[in-house]
Amino acid sequence: MRSKEALVLSPNRWNGVLDVGIFKFARFLMDMGYRVEHANLENPLTYLRGAPGITHRMIRPLPNRWMRWRWLWDMTYRLQPYGGLRREWDVLMTDASPLLYFANRVKAKVKIYRLNDLLSGFGVPKVILEEERRFVERSDVILVAHRSLLEGLPHRKAVYLPNPIDLELFPADGNFPEPEELRGIPHPRVIYVGAISEWFDWDTLIYAARRLNGVSFVVVGPPRSVPASLPENIFLLGGKPHSRVHLYMRHSDAAIIPFKLSPLIEAMDFPNKVLEYFAVGLPVVSIRWRSFERSFPQVLFYDDPNGAVRRISEALDAGKDPSLRRLVVPYGRDAIYAKFRRILSDVEAGRTLQD
């Protein structure tokens, strides 16, 4: 009897430095016995230079925002060398990205939309928003990461399922060596770990660093754009394997989430990184938005740069709190995996989904 097979379409590399939510669900499929393939889109230069790995790389001639015409997407699809787009799968899973164009053209017995973000907030062209509406209609189940995104979706197939955290990657006890890169950075350290894109508020981080010149601000993540001049107490360490980011957090004194507010950000119940920070007991400072404050009132929220400075000082004075880890348990891998397994079982059997 052959193993069931699943195709996962998502913009990031599975074996890259960002461990996004859909990859956690892809691993759930593997745990359930599926053979899983993953494909993403790369620009021509990255495609040609990219090292082989577990991601099947597809080529994209222009940046997503420039691909405004359907004929260009049609051509991109037809010329793809990856054969997985032209065969039938047992399960197809994709998330909120331009990969929706390809997902609508792949045959699968079960189609899963992992609705993880407000797609319009990424500035994608109209053609991709049309493809999203099409995939919502065609999908068998929509796994919604944030409650605000449930609005307007078909109730019969939309299920709230937040991103899980793998607590095994953030163990409570053990001997955790300090990364060598951190050893020359003085305490106290305030850390950010994650993607650095247009939503990252460099202005507030720079303002806080200048006001708190005795504090080291450590940024771990692959930056897309960095201001030309940064204060000397901001340290950019680049992307790190997800299995090692807890070491950088453990040897820091507080964490920060310096985002620019936008519909994309405010559509989130909370950023998943707060779970990781709390898992190692770090006090967390963040820009305030309503759904995040409602989900985790334990966060020290600010409304402006001066507020960020005050809250950072409060976090450093408060120090680490191991009891924060208890807040993360409901989002643990085992709890989310059990619900995902039941949902997929119901869909495959044609049963009505249970909330």
Image: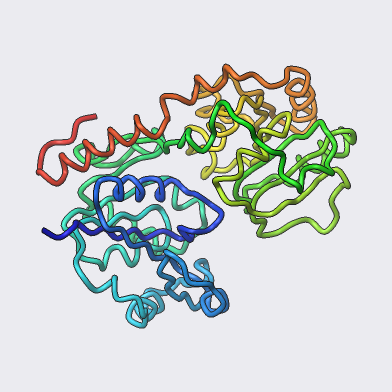
x and y percentages locating residue 121 in the rendered image: 50, 50
The quarter of the image holding the C terminus is top left
Residues 280 and 215: in front is 280
x and y percentages locating residue 241 in the rendered image: 58, 51
- Horizontal side, residue 96 vs residue 17: left or right: left
Q: Quadrant of residue 50?
A: bottom right
Please give the name of the residue rendered at 23% of the width and 59% of the height, measured from the top-left corner.
5
Residues 106 and 174: in front is 174
Please give the name of the residue rendered at 55% of the width and 47% of the height, measured from the top-left corner.
242
User: Looking at the picture, does residue 156 appear above or below residue 87?
Assistant: above
Please give the name of the residue rendered at 39% of the width and 65% of the height, measured from the top-left corner.
39
User: Looking at the picture, does residue 63 appear above or below residue 29?
Assistant: below
Please give the name of the residue rendered at 36% of the width and 48% of the height, measured from the top-left corner.
27
x and y percentages locating residue 295 in the rendered image: 49, 24
Residues 119 and 323: in front is 323
Residues 299 and 50: in front is 50
